[in-house]
Amino acid sequence: MNPRDREYEALRREIEKYTELEHSLYNIVYVGVTAILAWGISLKNSLICLLAYCIIFPSFRVMLSYNSGILRIGAYMHVFYDEYLWERKLHQICTLPKGKVVRYSSSYKTPFIFVSVLSTILSLIIPESVKLKTAYLL
């Protein structure tokens, strides 16, 4: 195997590693946020429901960082390894007819926005009397 093929395989493995990390991070976010929201609902404490943001914002930033790394490696591979088929097909799929490239990172916003809205709504649904008791205890 020549150095060019070894570099290609290393770059492809790195993309696959980032993709696995993204999937693992999604699982961590969903489990963590669900646990925090369940805890807040069981205690009827609206402030605990808002703690979900402590997981949502950092994980969203990490997820975008992984996505940025994948896009950079993919762009490098598309330019310097255009003879390989799957990168060329990926580029054709993600390119609009007018030549504009679809922003893949925008697809990350939907689950994070959904979880953020859910935690905010749950914090507002909990009765005011419980909120006042909690504030008095603090």
Image (cartoon, grey):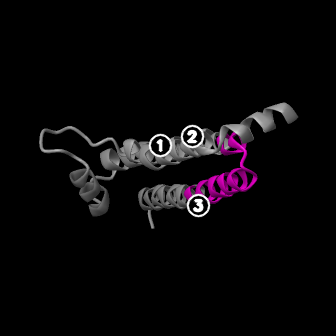
Category of crowding for the residue at label 2, using alpha-carbon neighbours closer than 10 angstroms: few (below 14), some (14–19), many (at least 20)? some
Of pointers 2 and 1, the one earlier in the residue sequence: 1
Q: Residue furthest right?
A: 137
Of pointers 2 and 3, the one earlier in the residue sequence: 3
Give the Cα separation between the discs numbered 2 and 3.
Answer: 21 Å
Q: Is residue 9 left or right of residue 120?
A: left
Q: Residue furthest front?
A: 129
Residue sitting nearer the eye, 68 or 103: 103
Q: Secondary structure at mark 2?
A: helix
Of pointers 3 and 1, the one earlier in the residue sequence: 3
The residue that label 3 is drawn on is 27
What's the magenta region?
26-50
Residue 12 picture quarter? bottom left
Category of crowding for the residue at label 3, using alpha-carbon neighbours closer than 10 angstroms: few (below 14), some (14–19), many (at least 20)? few
Q: Secondary structure at mark 3?
A: helix
Q: Does the residue at mark 2 contact the one at mark 1 (Cβ under 8 Å)?
A: no
Residue sitting nearer the eye, 71 or 30: 30
Residue 8 picture quarter? bottom left
The residue that label 1 is drawn on is 113
Q: Position of residue 22 (x, y in %)?
A: 53, 55
The residue that label 2 is drawn on is 120
Residue pictured at 33% horizontal, 52% vertical: 81
Give the Cα separation between the discs numbered 2 and 1.
Answer: 11 Å
Q: Secondary structure at mark 1?
A: helix
Q: Position of residue 102 (x, y in %)?
A: 28, 43
